[in-house]
Image (cartoon, helix red, strand yellow):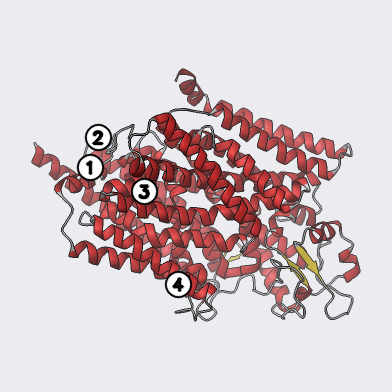
Amino acid sequence: MKTESSFLDNLPKVYGIYTGGFIAFVILMAILEQMGVSAATIGILFVAFTIVIYATIGWLSRTMEVGAYYVAGRSVPALYNGMATAADWMSGASFVALAGGIYFGGYGYLAFVVGWTGGYVLVNSLMAPYLRKFGCYTVPDFIGTRYGGNLARFCAVVILVVASFTYVTAQINASGTIAARALQIPFSYGVWFGLAGILLCSMLGGMRAVTWTQVAQYIVLIIAYLVPVIWMSNKQGFGLIPHFSYGDAVARIQELEPLLGLGTAAMESAPFGGVKILTTPHNAPGGPGASWQFITLAICMMAGTASLPHILMRYFTTPSVRDARRSVAFSLLFIFLLYFTAPALATLTKLQLLDPNLATSIIGKPFADVMALDWVQNWSSVKMLWLSDSNGDGILQLNEFFMRSGIVVLATPEIAGLPYVISGLVAAGGMAAAMSTADGLLLAIANALSHDLYYKIIDPAADTKKRLLVARALLIIIGAGAAMIATLQLTTILGAVAWAFCFAASGLFFPLVLGVWWKRANRAGAIAGMVIGFAAGTYYLVHVKFLGGEPWMDLNHLRFAIIGMPASLIAMIVVSLATPEPDAEMQAMVDELRVPSGKAILSEEH
Amino acid sequence: MSDSNSENRERHWEKTRSLTILVLVIWAIFAFVIPAYAKELNEMSFIGFPLGYYFCVQGSLAAFVVLIFFQNYRQDAIDDEFGLSE
């Protein structure tokens, strides 16, 4: 206990030294590169060094206390919880695919950027402070206690598992991709390697270990994201901080797009999946239905943000309700740092590929010259890039250049001709992002199964040791299951991520919100809301995506929460009103959770 | 005592609710209204950016950050006013 409090007092020092140490490591790598150490070795050192650090933190944070395992002893200061949440939140998708998505998707894709930040306003105003006051360990813990009964708790567990599992396979996929590239091993080994790193961080210390590794991972990922952008911006003459000056680059791209024949369909298709040509203009809102598409996607992502248990549970770890709110604010501030950089990165990368005035450009250049470039060869060999001189004119056209969206982040340093040390840094950052999110998700699933399903429903007599043993065993089983599915590579990284948000929003958003904001909401209503919302959303997803059904109102499979959420809301209101109101005790509980003062509703050890 | 206590809590909740509604209205403007009119806003420019584009990549995001800090500042004041902070 004593070492715990001295650790908390020394947080700025501990993470200050850590950050300094990491920067020193990057400089050391740069020196090694100058001395002629190979790129492959530097890549391996980057990934291995950072994983060893996270695993060490995970080992130092090991615990046998329930409170520490589930909610980090409720002692995480707001600023650090903000960093941990930002790492928890920014997944491999945010890090690797966000800029790529903007690169390919233009205006339509920006709905993700707005949705994934705006969601925090919902978290802060509707959820986090009230759930913190409640004193729960997991999100189903809130549902189960607020509405009462094992059935409600069980429904919440099911939705949590489906949503988080969908998400975690994408994260393990991302960590596998990065590990495979950095360590030069096959993808399927990379996946298992990534999983081993993830489990090392979370298994021994639960939430406490995940918290302190996530803070460390945030520091790595934000440095890794900002450094290449700033460097590239300097090289291209957009100044030290490109964020406020890349407006000219946007204009230049818009000028180049018609000249380069943007929108011309490809004449061939790539021999492997995942790669595509650029067809969407960089900044062209206002097409038919564009606003509708933007708003519906943003709603799904925002409501999903406010319902995803691995995010909400981070706010259970603060010492007070006020700290929970403050840490939401810090979370978004730290997330904002990356999110307002991603569009700058996408724009500058696109410009340097497209603009014939820049030395790095490839479109419009002789095909043989482009094929001889190192980065083109490197990324082609791992099937993330495919070029073909379809029309045989010896010049590379826009519709002959196929790439995976993840390349925009991962290969940008090479495209811009930055030293390899930057690529190694980016790989470490991507790894940190994917690992930190996977950790949070795996823990959310394992905790819900061990606390809500095993302890609360199956064996309420289990002692602490047995509970924590079950929690850890589940962590390994779920992680292994997710890794197995990840090796199948069923969908692109981002598709699966959007589904996770839609699952959570369809099933959990209204039962959570109305649990706080509508006293009349009762058990039957909540169960109806969860079951019908989740079922309606899932039905629509299957209908559109797998059965080839006609989309309704142009809602594609990324937006199925637009069907699930209203179904959930209506079912919950109708059924609540048709059944007796909650008893006085439950209504008093709702009154109590609305004020910050007083004791938490659930006791410290429950 | 119990009556004035519950009245106090009721007023606290009323103010909390009004603040939340205000925050959500501002949120909806930046999240939905502005991006939906991005094409029209792009006619104007701001520090070299088309304005609609600027809001989608930075302006709205920054507004959300400020909005949360603002809400917390106000909510702390409300909690203190009714003696209900921790």
User: Label 3 sits on what residue type?
Assistant: Pro
Is label 1 in a helix, a strand or a loop? Answer: helix
Provide the residue designation for mark 1.
Answer: A592
User: Label 2 sits on what residue type?
Assistant: Gly
Is label 2 in a helix, a strand or a loop? Answer: loop
Q: Residues within 10 Å of mark 1 (few under 14, many from 20)?
A: some
Q: Are marks 1 and 2 in contact (CB under 8 Å)?
A: yes
The vertical placement of A280 against B20, above or below, is below
Q: Position of residue A329 (x, y in %)?
A: 44, 45
Is label 3 in a helix, a strand or a loop? Answer: helix
The vertical placement of A395 against A487, above or below, is below
On screen, residue A490 versus residue B30, left or right, reads: right
Q: Are marks 4 and 1 on the same chain?
A: yes
User: Label 4 sits on what residue type?
Assistant: Tyr
Q: Are marks 4 and 2 in contact (CB under 8 Å)?
A: no
Provide the residue designation for mark 4.
Answer: A540
Mark closer to the observer (3, 2): 3
